[in-house]
């Protein structure tokens, strides 16, 4: 049997799967994520040391995947209106916040990483302001028409506290958009691609799904002493529960697929089919009744 290859990139900041198992920091398993040592924001502080690297990849406008897929799809689902007050949670260097501001919204970008917020402030800031805060500390930032959380929720251990805090600052009828790596198909270290040559099928292999996992992501695989960030895997049931518990209703759900096409070759057809079968991202639109 041919050696399985990995033609679809998994080493992006939004879905790295890390190097060989022997060099990886250990996984933690648990029924659900619970805070330890009183520290509810370890996900945020773990990004601080990766700010330079992340800014080189994402920069002012985002990677190609952001520009082609994430930003336009998120704008369409959230439908920001001119003059709305919108909070972009875990904003990083502000790519989505700038897209919202260009639509005429008044945007606050919030992130726990002071270095990423410093990067955000080096880019055009019309209609935008930035604050360094934990995602569960939103007091004083409302009343808001909407909150966006783009590819940051898997870094948050305390999703329950974040949802409660969000519910307190969103106006009745307000929206909250979540965009995540698809939790059913993209689980760092627990999902991978394989190729079955007899059937010419590129398949998705899942080694775990239902267990809550805390997964250290090695940001620079191959570098002797690489920084790690934490990714918190939750099953769909566990992911949605904090939103419902905070009183939000689910108003929309979309699954977004990669727009890439393989170069012509023996596996191109199978790879393209796999891209159409397995979504990269899950987008959820919540509404506060
Ligand atoms: C993958 S980056 C995404 C950044 C940005 N939304 C984007 O799409 O480019 C995850 C972000 O979540 C932020 N973050 C992680 N934990 C956080 C927390 N507890 N509070 C606020 N921000 C946090 C990190 O600092 C980082 O900027």
Image: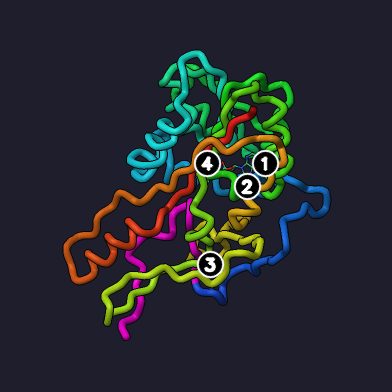
Helix, strand or loop at mark 3 = loop
Q: Up-down: is 109 above or below 215?
A: above
**Total number of numbered labels?**
4
Residue highlighted by disc 1: 244
Cβ–Cβ under 8 Å for marks 1 and 2: yes
User: In the image, residue 220 lies at what x, y percent?
Assistant: 50, 59
Tags 4 and 2 touching, CB below 8 Å: yes
> Of marks 3 and 2, which one's residue comes earlier in the chain?
3
- Which residue does the numbered mark 2 point to in the structure image? 240
Q: Which disc number belongs to residue 284?
A: 4
Asked whether the residues under the numbered discs 1 and 3 touch, taking CB atoms below 8 Å apart as contact, a structural biologist would say no
Q: Secondary structure at mark 4?
A: strand
- For the residues carrying marks 3 and 2, which lies nearer the camera in this image? 2
Looking at the rendering, the quadrant in which ligand 1 lies is: top right
What secondary structure predominates along the stretch shown in magenta? Answer: loop
What is the C-alpha distance between the residues marked 1 and 4? 12 Å
Q: Which residues are magenta?
A: 1-19
* Mark 1 vs 4: CB contact within 8 A: no
Nearer to the camera, 147 or 155: 147
Kindly state the secondary structure of the residue where label 1 is placed: helix
x, y (%) of residue 112? Answer: 65, 38
Q: Does 143 sit above or below residue 175?
A: above
Compare marks 4 and 2 and give the one earlier in the sequence.
2
Mark 1: give few (<14), some (14-19) or many (20+) Cα within 10 Å.
some
**Nearer the N terminus, badge 3 or badge 4?**
3
Q: CA distance from mark 1 to mark 3?
A: 29 Å
Q: Is residue 6 magenta?
A: yes
Real-space Cα distance between discs 1 and 2?
Answer: 7 Å
**Circle number at residue 189:** 3
């Amino acid at each position: 049997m041919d050696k399985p290859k990995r033609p679809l990139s998994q080493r992006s900041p939004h879905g790295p799967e890390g190097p060989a198992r022997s060099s990886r920091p250990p996984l933690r398993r648990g029924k659900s994520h619970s805070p330890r040592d009183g520290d509810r924001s370890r996900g945020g502080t773990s990004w601080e040391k990766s700010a330079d690297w992340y800014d080189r990849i994402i920069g002012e406008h985002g990677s190609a995947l952001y520009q082609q897929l994430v930003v336009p799809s998120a704008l369409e689902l959230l439908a920001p209106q001119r003059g709305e007050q919108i909070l972009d949670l875990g904003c990083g260097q502000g790519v989505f916040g700038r897209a919202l501001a260009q639509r005429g919204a008044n945007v606050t970008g919030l992130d726990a990483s002071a270095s990423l917020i410093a990067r955000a402030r080096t880019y055009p800031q019309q209609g935008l302001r930035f604050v360094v805060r934990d995602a569960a500390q939103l007091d004083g930032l409302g009343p808001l028409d909407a909150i966006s959380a783009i590819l940051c929720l898997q870094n948050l251990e305390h999703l329950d506290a974040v949802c409660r805090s969000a519910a307190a600052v969103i106006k009745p009828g307000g929206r909250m958009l979540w965009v995540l790596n698809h939790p059913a198909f993209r689980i760092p270290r627990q999902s991978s691609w394989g190729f079955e040559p007899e059937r010419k099928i590129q398949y998705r292999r899942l080694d775990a799904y239902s267990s809550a996992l805390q997964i250290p992501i090695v940001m620079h695989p191959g570098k002797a002493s690489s920084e790690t960030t934490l990714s918190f895997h939750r099953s769909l049931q566990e992911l949605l529960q904090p939103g419902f518990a905070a009183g939000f209703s689910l108003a929309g759900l979309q699954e977004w697929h990669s727009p890439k096409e393989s170069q012509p070759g023996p596996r191109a057809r199978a790879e393209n089919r796999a891209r159409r079968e397995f979504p990269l991202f899950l987008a959820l639109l919540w509404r506060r009744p």
